[in-house]
Image: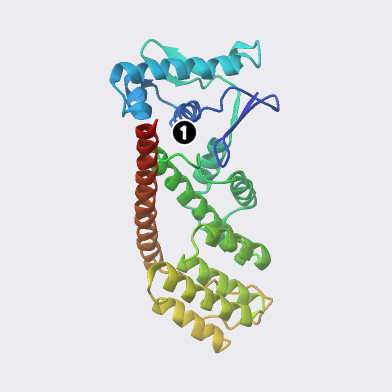
Amino acid sequence: MIQITLFGPFEVRCEGAPVPGLEARKAQELLAYLLIQRGRAWSREFLAELLWGQRMPAQSKKYLRQTLWQVQSALASQTSEPAVADLLALDGEWIRYNEQCAVQLDVAAFEQAHNRAEGVPGSDLDVQEAVALRQAVQLYRGDLLPGCYEDWCIFERERLQTIYRGMLDKLIDCCQRHSQFEQGLAYGETILRYDRARECTHRRMMTLYYLAGDRTSALRQYEHLAQALREELDVQPSRRSAALRDQIRADSFADSPLPLGNPRPTPHFQPSDAAADSRQHLRRLHVSLLQMQRQIGQEIAAIELALADS
């Protein structure tokens, strides 16, 4: 059995023991791409262009051959079992992940849990769906291949991070439905560590604090929201957030006559929440890309200077 971790630090284990020889960045990128895009074969020409596009075609294909040998040699050194060693299936000019190989892949389990609960509101999750989502979010130990800034990796990293936030959203609603306020707040804090200005998450946490009987913390959460929006985007909280603050300050939701401690209706979050969240996310992504461009430019300049002095 091979265990492969793509979330957070890249890691490959065989029967529990780390597999040496896969420390090279391109070996990790090649393996990660084929595993994420499992289910189809890719031409050598495409993979060479994807990973070494800045090189001449002949040189990029040479690097691909060397990296493939590196990956296969590392796996073969750990076992004499062909089903384990042949993680990648090579067929002439085509390369694919060998689906017959016994692999525990964190991204695969993560996506499976997401697909199972897709379209199901968090408040309607059954026990098995909720357990599967809780286990899936624990697999997310960090972003996909941190330190890799290739276009395909940035896209996949953002896609998986969006799925992760969506899972946490569902779990927050599930916790609210079952009065598990402390756990729901923990999920909210996790989201805000990735996206501190995510307004709908702040509103969910305000609601959870209020339902738990802690109006003071609910109002403080609104202040955290206002500060995050001001520092990150230079905007004020939306009217929806301000209205929720006013309801909490008045100690009454408009549609919730039940006393605290009993099941009560969940305040509805309108579709505009998702649109506003998407706009904020795109703004932050734009800023991150600009910062990344500057960093890469500085590193290139430093390398060129070092080469000129040598």
Q: Residues within 10 Å of mark 1 (few under 14, many from 20)?
A: some
Q: Which of 39 and 192 is in front in this view?
A: 192
- Eyeballing the image, is 123 above or below 56? below
Residue 197, percent from left and from top: 46, 66
Q: Which quadrant does the N terminus fall into?
A: top right
User: Which residue is label 1 attached to?
Assistant: 36
Residue 157, percent from left and from top: 45, 44
- Eyeballing the image, is 190 above or below 216? above
Q: In the image as oriented, which residue stretches furthest toward the bottom?
A: 250
Q: Which of 162 and 294 is in front in this view?
A: 294
Residue 182, percent from left and from top: 67, 66
- Which quadrant of the structure image shows residue 251? bottom right
Q: In the image as oriented, which residue stretches furthest toward the left?
A: 56
- Which quadrant of the structure image shows residue 193? bottom right
Three-letter code for the amino acid on which mark 1 is drawn: Ile
For image coordinates 49% across by 27% down, the residue present is 31
Q: Is residue 83 left or right of residue 230?
A: right
- Circle 1: element type: helix
How many discs appear?
1
Q: Is residue 147 left or right of residue 300?
A: right
Q: In the image as oriented, which residue stretches furthest toward the front?
A: 309
Q: Nearer the viewer, residue 106 or 100?
A: 106
For image coordinates 49% across by 43% down, the residue present is 115
Residue 20 in view (yes/no): yes
For image coordinates 51% across by 72% down, the residue present is 203
Q: Which quadrant does the C terminus fall into?
A: top left
Tell me the colour scheme of the image. Answer: rainbow
Q: Nearer the viewer, residue 50 or 125?
A: 50
